[in-house]
Amino acid sequence: MAEAQCDTPYRHGNCHLIELVNVVKAYQTPAGKFYALKGVNLRVDTHEFVAVIGKSGSGKSTLINMITGIDRPTSGEVYVGDVAVHKLSEGQMAVWRGKHVGVIFQFFQLLPTLTLVENVMLPMDFCNTYPPRERYDRAMHLLERVGMADHAHKLPSAVSGGQQQRVAIARALANDPPIIVADEPTGNLDSKTANTVFDMFTRLVDEGKTILMVTHDQDLARRATRAILVADGEIKDELRTA
């Protein structure tokens, strides 16, 4: 890929932890092609906290789905560290994402038949990270970090939405990924709980994580390192907030 010279390039020549190069995403509809992303270029460095803001349908969720490999670009390139994400097979993608990207969803997506601690252990089981005898203790440690250890053996239905989102954060941290991607993680939470979740993200960045967060909440976005405005499938503006 053509890229400016840098002191410590990654394997494919990218100079930044996350790089999107001319990414286009088109969907076929009865009315013809709909372009959710139109030649997007994005750079995110290690230890950044980037908020992605925009109206519904602007393309912001599609943008982060390119980074996590949940969706693939129609054209363009996606690099995360040493990995060309757009070139991975489905099987490679699942393993890579499980180890390197923690994904947090708006609707939590905890498995309803597993206890909270079992939900947190699941990524470790799936990716075979950490010795089996250590996984329970690690899951409990993560639940302790998010203030949910006392509820570890409850089912998701037995705790509130805000508590489920805390568990979802613990689950995203299970394999100690360098990157956390959150799609409207506070969208279903009251403002007090949303602030608590945001404070957790801030602490994680202070500890060395890189976080991308899609949000409608402009007040929260202003507290990130940088805010990116997405509209009509394009990055229209960037605001460095810190």
Image: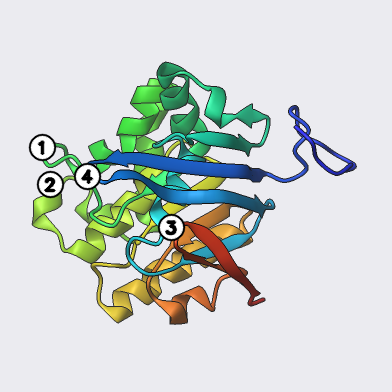
Q: Secondary structure at mark 2?
A: loop
**Mark 3 to mark 4: distance in Å?**
23 Å
Q: Secondary structure at mark 4?
A: loop
Image coloring type: rainbow
Q: Residues within 10 Å of mark 4 (few under 14, many from 20)?
A: many
Residue 17, quarter of picture: top right
Amino acid under label 2?
A: Leu
Kindly identify the residue that appears in the image at 44 percent across and 79 percent down: 218
**Mark 4 to mark 2: distance in Å?**
9 Å
| Labels 2 & 1 near each other (Cβ < 8 A) | yes
**Mark 4 to mark 1: distance in Å?**
9 Å
Q: Is residue 104 above or below residue 200?
A: above
Kindly identify the residue that appears in the image at 54 percent across and 29 percent down: 86
Amino acid under label 1?
A: Thr
| Labels 4 & 2 near each other (Cβ < 8 A) | no
Kindly identify the residue that appears in the image at 65 percent across and 44 percent down: 19
Q: Residues within 10 Å of mark 3 (few under 14, many from 20)?
A: many
Q: Earlier in the sequence, mark 2 or mark 3?
A: 3
